[in-house]
Image (spheres, rainbow, N blue to C red):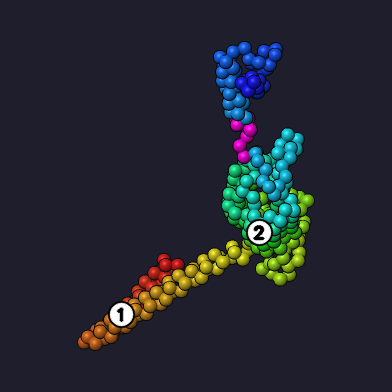
Amino acid sequence: MGEVLQEHGGAALLPGSCRSHRGVTSSPVEVGTCKRTLAASVTQAFFCLLLCVPWGSSCPPSCQCTERAGAKAVVCSSRHLEEIPEDIPRDAVFLKLDTNSITRIPGDAFRHLSLLEELDLSRNAIEQIEAAAFRGVAARLRTLDLSGNRIRSIPKEALLALNADLRLANNPWHCGCALQEVLWEARLDPASVRDITCHTAPREELVGKPLLQVLDAGVDLCGARRGTPDVAVLVTMFGWFAMVIGYLICYVRHNQEDACKRMDYLRALPGTQGHADTSGTAATTAATTTATTAATTAL
């Protein structure tokens, strides 16, 4: 009786094609063949599952992953995050990290997200952005929102490689040359440009004013930086000019002293009093002429 039950129980686990109309296999050989067929089918199904499921598609515990128009959207809003999650799916197209406590964007933070098109980092506590922060996403990124953070300055290298619309409003910006260069060369979202305000600035009268208004008034925030080399050039030129003038003065005095010594020597000779006067005058004139010519050539 036990053997019969064991046979019935084992047969119940086999696929329908391996059982007779009564639910019992016809022979032990057929049972073994069916078991091997079943094992091969399970193995094939397992490998197919591994190949069909894309790697990196798991969702971080602190985020919610959904499909939006056939593209993966990863939403990590208001999750008290202090840094960017490292396990964001590689096939993410939309990534929202807004309303968290993220303080910095390190280099290569999104390099593995080659399909990313929209990145929202607004309303965080970001103070530092490294030059290579967005390396790897420049090709496809269309929107980058950095508004509502604590950003005072940003390396232009971090943004100029992007083709995305930048939103930089509501940050405590320092209105200096670096920010002016970003505005000139980067691609800013027109709706948010007017909300970029000078929290600090080299000139006190610029504090509190919209940066766009400051630039429209003709203020060049890079003027002080460009003026420094000009002053250095002027100082160098003045130094060389003073050296040339000093050299000419010494040269003229030296020639005059030589002429005077020669004239005194000629006067001391007997019978050459009148000739000495004439020669001394000629020597002095020649020395003066030579010095004048040298000064003209040097200038």
User: Visible in this render: residue 161?
Assistant: no
The span from disc 2 to disc 1 (Cα, nearest Å) is: 78 Å
* Left or right: residue 255 compared with residue 73: left
**Magenta-colored span:** 50-56
- Which numbered circle lies on residue 19? none
Closer to the chain start, of discs 2 and 1, is 2
Local crowd size for mark 2, using a 10 Å CA cut-off: few (<14), some (14–19), many (≥20): some
Return the x and y of residue 65 as percentages of the image width and height: 71, 42
Please tell me which residue is depicted at 71% across the width and 63% down the height of the picture: 172
SS label for mark 2? loop
Determine the residue positioned at 75% across, 38% down: 68
Question: Which residue is depicted at the point 29% across and 83% down?
Answer: 261
Q: How many marks?
A: 2
The image quarter in which residue 26 lies? top right
Residue 103's disc number: 2
Q: Position of residue 291 (x, y in %)?
A: 38, 73
Residue furthest out toward the front: 1
**In the image, what residue type sits under mark 2?**
Thr
Rendered image quadrant of residue 5 = top right
Q: The residue tagged with tag 1: helix, strand or loop?
A: helix
51 inside magenta stretch: yes
Image quarter where the C terminus lies is: bottom left
**Left or right: 148 in relation to 221:** right
Nearest to the observer: residue 134 or residue 16: 16
Question: Which residue: 59% across, 54% down?
Answer: 106
- Residue that carries the numbered disc 1 in the rendered image: 258
Whether residue 97 sits left or right of residue 281 in the image: it is right
Residue 82 rendering spot, x and y as whole percentages: 66, 57
